[in-house]
Structures are given as C-alpha cells and as structure tokens.
Image (cartoon, rainbow, N blue to C red):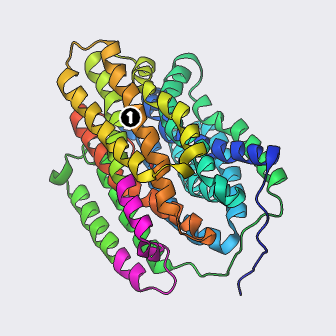
Amino acid sequence: MAITKSTPAPLTGGTLWCVTIALSLATFMQMLDSTISNVAIPTISGFLGASTDEGTWVITSFGVANAIAIPVTGRLAQRIGELRLFLLSVTFFSLSSLMCSLSTNLDVLIFFRVVQGLMAGPLIPLSQSLLLRNYPPEKRTFALALWSMTVIIAPICGPILGGYICDNFSWGWIFLINVPMGIIVLTLCLTLLKGRETETSPVKMNLPGLTLLVLGVGGLQIMLDKGRDLDWFNSSTIIILTVVSVISLISLVIWESTSENPILDLSLFKSRNFTIGIVSITCAYLFYSGAIVLMPQLLQETMGYNAIWAGLAYAPIGIMPLLISPLIGRYGNKIDMRLLVTFSFLMYAVCYYWRSVTFMPTIDFTGIILPQFFQGFAVACFFLPLTTISFSGLPDNKFANASSMSNFFSYLVRISWYVVDNDAVGTTRIVTPIVS
C-alpha cells in the first residue's frame, strides 16, 4: 500500500537559498568527479604500479556503474523516497571517495570506483527533482537556472583542477575533495529538509528489466571504452559485447513497453513537450560535448598544451552561462522559451563554422578562446529553456523519473563524441553523463 504524505508548503527565504546551495553542490560534486580523474590516469597508474591501459579501468568502472544507476533512480525513489535515497547516495558517495583516496592497489581503487559510480547515479536526477519540489511553482524556472550553472561549470573545472592537483599534490586529493562537500550537503539537507520526504509505494524491482539494462548499458560502455585498444571489430571481445548490448537494449525496450512494473517509465513520452524536449536536449548536448571533449585532448596531443592550459582554453564557454542563466531564470516566464532554443542552435552553427575556417595548427590562444566565449551564449540558451519545456505539464511525482530518463538518453547519444575522441585523438576517454 502506498504511503501518502501531505505536500509540504514550498520553502522560502534563507532556508530556500541554503537548500539550493546544498542540492547544487551535490550536482557539482558528481559532475566534477566524472571528469577530474581523466587527466590523472598516468599519475595514478604509475603510483599503483599499473600500466596506463590498466589504469583506464578507473574511469571505465565509474562510467559503467554510473550509467546503470541513472535510469533506475526513479524506481528506487518511488520505493524508498527521493530524500532518503538522495541522502544515502551522498553518504556512500562521500565514503567511497574517501576509500578511493586511500587505495593502495588498483583492484581496491576500481572496486570503490564502482561503488562511487553507483552512488553518483541518483545525485543529479534527485537534486533536480528535490529542487523543483521545494520551490514555489512560479519560481521553478529561476531554480533551474541556478542549478544549471553547476552542471555547466563542473565539467569545465574538472580537468583543470585534476591537472593542478596532480602537479602539486597527491593524486588522492582528486577523490578526497568530495568528502567535505558531501558533509556540507548532508548537514544542510538533514537539517533543512527534515519532514519533507516524498510519497512512497512498495513497488517490486523488475529483475528481467534490470538484467537487460545492466547487460545492454554495461556492454555498450565497455565496448566503446575499450574498442580502440582492442582494434574494434577485429576483436572477438568487441563483437560479443556489441551483440549482447544490441540484443539486450532492444529486448529492454520491448519488455519495458509491456511490463506492468517497468524500470524505465516510457509513458513519459506520451507528453509531447517531454518528447520534443528530450530529443532537442540530446541534439544540443552533441554540440556542447564536442567543445568540452575533443578540444582539450586536441590541444594537448597536437598543440603541446598541458592539462591546465588546455582547460583554460575551453573554460570561456562557461562565462556567459554564469552571467545569463540567472537572468533567463528571473525573466523566463515572460519569454517564449522556443525563441531562446532557436537562438541557441543558430549560435552553435555560427561558432562551429567559425572554428572550421580559423582552427589551424598555427592558431594562437586568443583565436581558440573567442569561439568558446561566444558559444557560451548557445549553452546558456539551450539548457534551461529545454529543461523547462521538457518538465512543463508533468506532475510533481514524475520529476524524478523524467530527470532520470532525460539523463539516460542524453548519455546514450553523447557516447558518439567519446568514440570519435578515442579514434581521432588516440587517447582513452570515459563516457560520462553530462546531465540535463
């Protein structure tokens, strides 16, 4: 029998601001951890006495676990409550981060990276859902604007911070920095969100669906992450992973469409706004990911930039979102969001054309950062409007499922950039979900 609760009144004043900071910090912590270790693999591998190829499992293990955890978040939240699941995830994410920093061999580190990835999965969908639930309806656009800034900035800060830590401190601090942030999030949420748990119902976990999800997404992640190392389809391992992944994902869609207790809430796609919004977000993230995935590696591998300077070269893409997002949030109710989305895609086209005619081996630092700066207009004008469009018309109890689904599909499509990155640049990368 479902456990029903009266809906608490929206938060106000200083309490609302503190909750916003806590939930945004949880998102920042997860997004930062998804990218901060990428530049540290050689350092970690050397310290633990492993090869660089073996060290990439530090990234792959997190990516596989994270990708599996994201789509089941909505179902788990329905069973135990959004706030309770969020607090558990933050707690064990912080503890696993601590254990990662103390690891003395690669096997132990990979184990705790798996735990970390599983705990990271619910953080972004639930922080978004809890934020929307606790804001007054008329201020939810502003809430999303504040929250979205962390989603945009964290992946930019990750490689820069990771490179700086590896150059000046022990590699363990890459993971240890999550602990104080986790303590702050837990303290604020336990204090300020007490008694604001969501409704729960004793739903059963769909084991066939979960099995297909693990096989499909896990196989796809490993296949793409290790494809270049194993020479793609000249390897029987890659062929087997591909077959298992494709069959499992097709079977998953069929099973979830007919199951009375689905893990993936496909009924969300009955909403026209949600469907159009998710398709548009996916396309927009393809453009966004190209700027933050390919360029840093290109600058390091072909132009001699170190990790810090490569990060600084693409960091200007985050300047305009910091300035514009609060304005969009404040006046978003007076603006047709479709106009902002149209402007965003036009700006993407202009910036990528700009790069196509100016990006040469002799390009200087200024020539690199100018398109990045102007692309910030496009980033600011797609994330918040498309998220607002996607969630419009959905009941509050669908927010967690909708956010999980949005992240899941963005992840699946965004994989293509990391495959291109593996082959074009020649380095192994992680497929990380950059949330929507």
| Residue 167 point in image, percent of width and height | 52, 17
Quadrant into which the N terminus falls: bottom right
Q: Along the horizontal axis of the image, is 415 left or right of 382?
A: left
Label 1 CA crowd tier, 10 Å (few <14, some 14–19, many 20+) = some
| Residue 79 point in image, percent of width and height | 65, 74
| Residue 373 point in image, percent of width and height | 40, 25
Q: Along the horizontal axis of the image, is 360 left or right of 305?
A: left
Question: Which residue does the numbered mark 1 point to in the structure image?
Answer: 292
Tell me the chief SS of the magenta region: helix
Q: Nearer the viewer, residue 325 or 73?
A: 325
Q: Nearer the viewer, residue 307 or 291?
A: 291
> What segment is highlighted magenta in the picture?
252-281
| Residue 210 point in image, percent of width and height | 47, 73
**Up/down of 34 relative to 47, above or below:** below
Residue 235 visible in the displayed image: yes
Number of marks drawn: 1
